[in-house]
Image: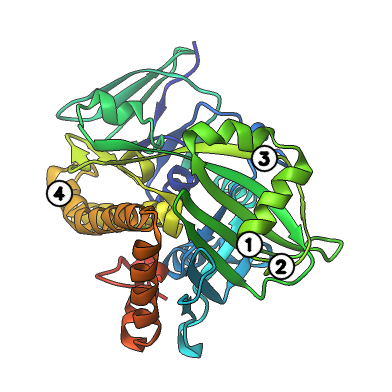
Amino acid sequence: MSADVNAEVVILGGGLVGMTLAIGLARAGITSVVVDNSDPAAQTADGFDGRASAISTASWNLYTHLGLAETLEPLGCPIASIAVTDGMKPGRIDFQPGAEDGTLGRMFANRDLRIAMYAAAAKESAITFLPNAKVVSRERGDHGVAVSLADGRTLTGRLLVGAEGRASPTRDEAGFTPARWKYGHRAIIAGLSHEKPHGNVAWEIFYPAGPFALLPLLDDAEGRHRSALVWTVAEGDAAGVLALPDGAFLSAVRERMGGIFGAVALTGSRTSWPLNFHHTARMVAQRLALVGDAAHGMHPIAGQGLNVGLRDVAALIEVLTDGMRLGLDPGDAQVLARYERWRAADTFMVSAATDVLTRLFGVPGRLPSAIRRLGMAGVQRLPALKHFFMDEARGMSGTLPSLLQA
């Protein structure tokens, strides 16, 4: 039997959200043990899943405060503007911030983010990372928490954090009952190289079957222009789209792109992910806090999923730090209640907004399309409204934790 591990916080889930939380807690002098059932070598293998994430301005501020920006800076592609269009028809919106606001964010391959997180965590003596570990039981009591692993180890602490993602067993075991539904869609993920430069523009092209997103990436070592494709298709069509020969797949992609990037080619394999929605009304219970997709899983239509999870992280770090500075236990009900109050409205609003957008742009027909494009043209002509939407996308609205501020 292996030795037991004790830390102030036990984090179940070592993905991007869970590992960022551990690093932030370590920088605040709070110890944690991170348990993950996956293998870091597989998670960081070249071509593991091909996914990329848009890191908002607020999330970049978090990485900067945690000392990760220097490592990540050369790996991310700045997003200078976002073009939103209904099927490449007239009436699009161009979101382009002013010089004083900087970029709308940065695009990173998830693999690069994982490598940076693992490397940073390895340097922190306050973090104990246990990969390839299976949790067999969780206990929460008046005075602490205990987690038993399949290999016989017992982990003890003052607070348990569920960060395992959408299928969080910690959330389900604790009796949370999230509102949830399936969209009947799958996201097809692929890497593209293309003839024309993307100009650091992220494209969100809406079709009745679902959004078709082109997200800018840095040119590769050979100087090829690259973008990440996230193409939403009906669940019943996904297998057929994945099975298309490369030539037929690229032909379908070019048709939906309207030729904006010229000739295109695949840079890796295609993968797919089911799309669904869930949202918990509560984010805390006795000595338990949920972060990221464990609490709220949303449609990737606006690229906000990871960013909302990182806002959870920043808020939780701040309330724990403030509470412990006053001598409170990290699992104190007052501390956790403050975290829940801080995050409840933001997570609900973002989740609801992505759901409404998905349904609004999924209504087929010429009349709904014309109405949408009329509304988009109106937004295009209203700088104040555009600035509001950009602040939301950048994560810079509302009362922000200090780690999210510049």
Asked if residue 291 shows in the view, the reply is yes
| Nearest to viewer (mark 1 / mark 4) | 1
| C-alpha distance separating marks 4 and 3 | 42 Å
Total labels: the figure holds 4
Pinpoint residue 63: horizontal percent, then vertical percent.
Answer: 50, 62
| Nearest to viewer (mark 4 / mark 2) | 2
| C-alpha distance separating marks 3 and 2 | 19 Å
Mark 3 or mark 1: name the one nearer the start of the chain: 1
Kind of residue at disc 3: Arg
Identified at 45% across, 13% down, the residue is: 150
Q: Quadrant of the C terminus?
A: bottom left
> According to the image, label 2 marks what residue?
261
Does 247 appear above or below 91? above
Mark 3 or mark 2: name the one nearer the start of the chain: 2
Kind of residue at disc 2: Phe
Mark 4 or mark 3: name the one nearer the start of the chain: 3
Kind of residue at disc 1: Met
| C-alpha distance separating marks 1 and 4 | 46 Å
Kind of residue at disc 4: Ala
Pinpoint residue 25: horizontal percent, then vertical percent.
Answer: 39, 51
Q: Image check: 182 left or right of 106? A: left
Pinpoint residue 139: horizontal percent, then vertical percent.
Answer: 25, 22
> According to the image, label 1 marks what residue?
257
Asked if residue 395 shows in the view, the reply is no
| C-alpha distance separating marks 4 and 2 | 49 Å
Label 1, secondary structure: give it: helix
